[in-house]
Amino acid sequence: MHRDSERHKLFTRRALMLGGGQAALLSVLVGRMYYLQVIESQRYVTLADENRINFRLLPPPRGRIVDRNGFAMADNQQNYRVVIIPEQAGDVERTLDLLSLIVPLSGGERRRIRREVKRKRAFVPITVRENLDWSEVARIEVNTPDLPGVLIDVGQSRSYANGLETAHVLGYVAAVSEKELTGDPLLELPGFRIGKAGVEKVYDLALRGSGGSSQVEVNALGRVIRELNRQEGQAGNEVRLTIDMQLQHFVAERLGNDSATVVVMDVHTGEVLSLVSSPSFDPNSFNTGLSQVEWESLISNPKAPLTNKAIAGQYAPGSTFKPVVALAALEKGVISPDTTIHCSGSTKLGNSEFHCWKKGGHGLLDLTGAIEHSCDVYFYEVARRTGIERMAAMARRFGLGEKLGLDLPGEKNGLMPSNKWKLGAIGVPWQLGETLIAGIGQGYILSTPLQLAVMTARLANGGYAVTPRLTMDRVTPTGIEPYTDEEGAPLGLSPEHLAVVRKGMDNVVNSPTGTARRSRIPEDRWQMAGKTGTVQVRRISKAERETGVLKNDDLPWIERDHALFVGFAPVQNPRFAVSVVVEHGGGGSSTAAPIARDVLRETQRLAELRPPRGHQDVQAVPQSGSKDGSKGGPVVGSGKPPVRGT
Amino acid sequence: MLFHDGLLSHPKVSIGQKLLHLHWLFVVLLALTAGIGFAMLYSAGGGNFEPWASRQMVRFGVGLLGMVIIAVTDIRLWLRYAYAFYFMVLVLLVAVEIAGFVGMGAQRWISFGLFNVQPSELMKVALVLGLARYFHGGSIEDVGRPMFLIPPLLMVVIPAILIVRQPDLGTTLMLVLASIAMFFAAGVRMWKFILAGILGLIGAPVAWFTILRDYQKQRILTFMDPETDTLGAGYHIIQSKIALGSGGMFGKGFMQGTQSHLNFLPEKQTDFIFTMLAEEFGLVGGLTLLSLYILLLTYGFVIAASSRNHFGRLVAIGVNVTFFLYIFINIAMVMGLIPVVGVPLPLVSYGGTAMLTLLFGFGLLLCVHIHRDLTIGRRDSGDEF
């Protein structure tokens, strides 16, 4: 076997070489393993975690909005919805057939569900119907054994208890639009809602809170295997409004379906107790989405239910402006409280004739009388003497012609015209005739109902630049802190002048001959003072004046006069100011004043029922105290009744 | 000594004696390796013996029995029927071409009613036997003559073409590489391998455009840059590397592999089972299995080198190289060193066919070991047996 041993030797040599080759290749494997599992390991650990760990955002519950007494105006409601998980349902169509015996499903809904079933993974729940009522929920729960893969899911949706009455204050929430994405991942959550109007919008960040997160382990198909870690979010802050929901309700009822606004505010703190713009809309329907028909009817309504007219409606103030004109004239010294002017029913300037609202004229009147009777001729003369610039300056001190900074979106400026403004805006110099018209609050002058309320509050509180606000505390995106600077700066008005004007306003209501005498509040301690205003929305032609001015009742609604009233109460120690504007309501004394009376009466009735919390301090501290000392100006302490009603 | 020269005339040794001389340590190492496989299949089943681990255990048990039976048969029987077996498998391969059905995207299986056979797997053993028989009959001088090499080349090329057409690139590759190793061990001159290598380099571009299917080309292309196709073909490699790498030194723990248990890892119970092992037991686990393999391979070499008959030596080296190729191709694939080719991890991956091939091969290896002292003449074809 010599030859075989040769073969054997050769074989052994070659086998050793093969073994060597194998060893070399195996060490490559070992090297590679070492590289992947030791040197590069950390990188792959990260990648493996990225594979398996998903972050899910947990939406925080939106903060409630409550009224000054803690009544929930905007709350989160459990929203029961029925979902179907195709994987568990097996035969989706059959299950839907059974389900529609309890919750009738339209063809469109079924098409949508079918589409989603096809598009989404089999374990993803698909919403069949939202906002189920209790009986539907109960019937589905009872029939669960026959409805495989059908589940009741609870979500949260915003609900407004008295939606129609609060819509213009609270606004509403709706789905996030493309433009509103800020990079906050919460906004990208399906179904997440943000404030789109009103307080919901202004304080959206505070109400929103911050999202929590849940770390879940998912498999390659994206199915959740378990929760690894959960971080609860921060619920949204509760925002307490200055609104008194009971008063708000009363006002809304009182206005009914009129196109009207009412603003009630505290003359010292600026707290807005009620702000109603009528007609309104139901903010709850914006949450779920409006139908085309509902939307069309809202935007085509001439009474503009979507517009908050209390801050965005601009009206000539009419005669409610006369107290401001009077103060401007008194301060300039062109009249004194005793200055008398004779009203013959009209006055002439050049070729133009300016008429008083009272055809036969008022005869001889002093300032309080002119306010009491709202004599136009008296104020034509006063305006002529004062000039537009002084009037405009005084009006601005009362908050007219500029935004007041109320915490609501969409506030309008109003307009306080001047020579400079007219040159800029129209390109024509100011005419003296226009000054006369401005003297009775008409012409170019525009004001919002909120501005009228603030103007009245500043008259009533003794001349402090109180600013309106809607929240009891200062709301910032990070939290809630109390207000510190509630009282406005003194406007630098003479107490005597204010007293005269307020006397006139007292007489308007409480004198037997006042323009609003029928709207007197019967309770002595609640008596109000005020000023009527009736604003023409059309031009009365010479021909019409000769044949007799048409009565409002004979005119189409859109051509009737706006009815205005501003007032404060109690007369002796004013605490509340109100402005009422009834669009095309006819006369200020006949339409607006009775509303103001009812509202102020209710406001005071409610205030007596509830011991004031928010403005306790304000009342305890004398209004003028420190301010007198520092400024030394001629200001009036509102703590003492400067005027006494007759 | 069982087969001492004196015993040659009495080759009939009792089965009991042969069993006594079985390489039991080798069998134990096999069982340990398979045991690692059972554990991994148990884990892959989510902590269940079903559906994989229990079946694999049954298969291994049956296969082990078959292996011992093969080990104690007389080696001359295998010498005698080597060609017959080879041709039988070749016929099956042709039959697959004609009657086979497509399984797993390739035409590989042939049905025998009750069970399905993958003839390409059987060919791995049949070719080893056939080539061993051929080279056993050739002297050193014969092996030096180029003409002498033509029949064995045909024996390799014909099945290789049939299998690559199925198409099964992995099996073809293993078949060809194992054959080259056997040619090498049989003593074919070095320069011939160098020449063949040069010809291969020239032939590769030709093969690219003629033999390779699109999906095979795609696999090779993907392998070059797996990141380009993260959800398609490259997904397997990337996820496998992530699983391996994240296993680190000691692994995530038994049944704690996130990549495998959350199904990011594809085919975790078959081709990518090594990845799962390395994810759950880390580098330590991977090296442990590799050490078992190295021990088995070493014993394979020892058995080959210590056989006193050339047929046995060649069979042993053929089985050894085939075993090595399984190991290397699979592990190199899951670590992203070579393209994704469907080669299972021997004794560990779930699957009956590879287990069958391997235990058949190990049976022959052990048979060589038992008959290591038996000398068989060059012209002796075992016919007297």
Image: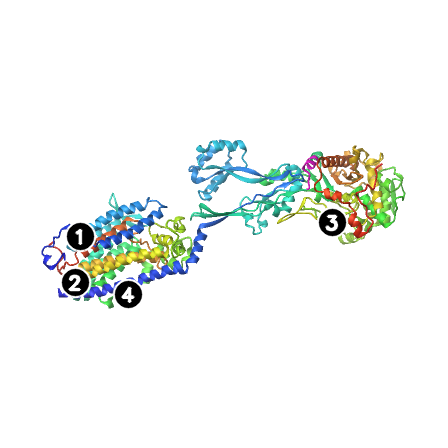
Residue under label 3, please give it. Answer: A402
- Amino acid type, residue under disc 2 in the picture: Gly
Residue B62 x/y as whole percent: 24, 47
Estimate the x, y position of residue A574 in percent, counting from the top left: 78, 40
Check the picture and name the quadrant holding the N terminus of chain B: bottom left
In this figure, which residue is indicated by the disc labeled 2?
Answer: B138
Labels 2 and 3 within one chain: no
In the rendered structure, which amino acid carries the disc numbered 1? Leu
Q: Are marks 2 and 4 on the same chain?
A: yes
Residue that extends furthest to the bottom in the rendered view of this protein: B191
**Which residue range is magenta in the image?**
A242-251
Residue A248 inside the magenta-drawn segment? yes
Report in which chain the residue with disc 3 lies: A
Q: Which sits earlier in the primary sequence, circle 1 or circle 2?
A: 1
Label 1: which secondary element: helix
Camera-side mark, 1 or 3: 1
Q: Which mark is residue B197?
A: 4
